[in-house]
Image (cartoon, rainbow, N blue to C red):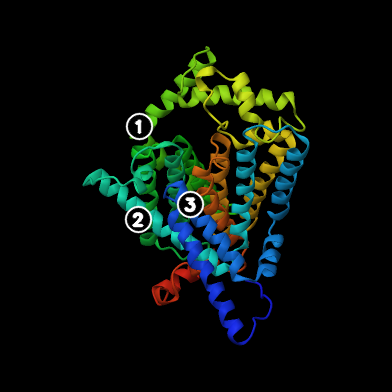
Amino acid sequence: MSAGPAEPAGRDGKMHRMRSSIVGPVAMFWGLAVFAPVGVNYVAALLLLVALLAAGGLRERAARVRASPLWWPIVAYVAWTLVILAIGPHYPQTPSNLWHGMRIALTMLMALALGRDEAIWAVRGFFVAALASLAMVLLYRTVGFPIWRLWHATLEVDGNKSINNALLFTLFGATAAVAGLAQFGERGAHRPGRALAAFALTAVAGLVITAWLTSRTSLLALLVAVPAACVHQWRRQLRTLAVALMIGTAVAGVALWQSPQVQQKVALGLQEIEAAQGGAVSEGSWVVRFYMYRDTTRMVLDRPFTGWGIGGWTEQWHARGPALLANYNMPHNDFLWMGAQAGFPGALVLLAILLTGLWQGWRRPDLAGRLGFIAMIAMTIATSVNSAMRDAQIGLGMLWVTFVYLRLAHEPGAPWDDLLPARWRRGGGAAAAAALRAQ
């Protein structure tokens, strides 16, 4: 972390250090809260914003954010949104859509403003929450226990919050896969036992999102992210890469072949698309998407430069979409959402944010870059087939963790080595850290 301004001396300096030490635990609280209902995530976001402002060092944080490759794409996204707000028509939905647009940018900026240790705190919280949630799902499905409302969307399919939680399991599973792949280092340090333990976590996460918290979006993200991690790690070792991809494809193929839930979901999706093309209207997942994508594309083409104004998608959807589906307020694709209300420039600035994040992870060939890369892959897929930013049910948890990963991808050195507390990294832990640094 870059050096900040000199701390005040005496009592003022002590107060400054106390305020600064609050940010890490508050960031960890948001990491712990990502599986919880959206209201808890809003509280966590508000607490972090207050902690960042109260901790001081804002000049250092601003410099850190401006140094990120994501700074100018985010600025362009905010600026174009405000331009459309100023020149475009307003609707009853304008305030809520403006709020969500600014919330998206604020979530990204808060993650990028974290210091190295603060971002590590946030990741620790996410890992603890993910492990606890996986254990809870396994116990619920084997032993059984009463469901508390706090964990309902983790244990049973419950709207978009369950999609968020499934995506978080995907990200955790892909992270475990990256950790497993890292045990086969480029310098000959192979630890198959640790790799198998990491891959076991990936398998458990995959089981949850295919058998119980079934989400085609999450499964697709996992099936893309893990091979992408292999390509990232062995991009200069084509023979090793080919072997890894063949083994991964075989394992994934067998797992999917043995999963009737996934086969049923895929078959149902194909049936829904075929029915929608024939004119059928229902609330089937891909029937809804068929009409949303078709009609929203027409909205964008009708007003390609400035769109219909912030909040204009809902008004146009009521005018164009089937009456049975009139209660939806977002098009299940954030590029189309931005394109409908802010034209092609709006969709492009959102795409620029995601592409910049992907490039930031890709160009860094080590563990930190790889984790940022797979996190952004999962986020990009979720944004393309769901409202993963516009919908706060997803855009507060998944977006937050993704950009914390990207924050660490911009940190020099080996930031992920510090994930475990120092007293846990002695002995074998230090050797493992050295192996990860070799990546």
Name which of mark 3 and mark 1 comes first in the sequence: 3
State the SS at label 3: helix
Q: Nearer the viewer, mark 2 or mark 1?
A: 2
State the SS at label 1: helix
Above or below, comparing residue 96 to residue 187 in the picture: above
Q: Compute the Cα span from label 2 to label 1.
A: 24 Å
**Picture quarter containing residue 100?**
top right
Residue 273 visible from this viewpoint: yes
Residue 10 drawn at (x, y percent) = 60, 87
Q: Residues within 10 Å of mark 3 (few under 14, many from 20)?
A: many
> Disc 1 marks which amino acid?
Gln
State the SS at label 2: helix
Q: Quadrant of the C terminus?
A: bottom right
Above or below, comparing residue 263 to residue 31 in the picture: above
Q: Which mark is residue 41?
A: 3
Q: Compute the Cα span from label 3 to label 1.
A: 30 Å
Q: Which mark is residue 132?
A: 2
Q: Nearer the viewer, mark 3 or mark 1?
A: 3
Callouts 3 and 1 close, C-beta under 8 Å: no
Q: Compute the Cα span from label 2 to label 3.
A: 17 Å
- Residue at image coords 26%, 49%: 139
Residue projecting furthest to the left: 143
Q: Give the labeled residue for mark 1.
A: 261
Task: From the viewer's side, name the closer residue of 189 and 116.
Answer: 116
Q: Is residue 335 left or right of residue 192?
A: right
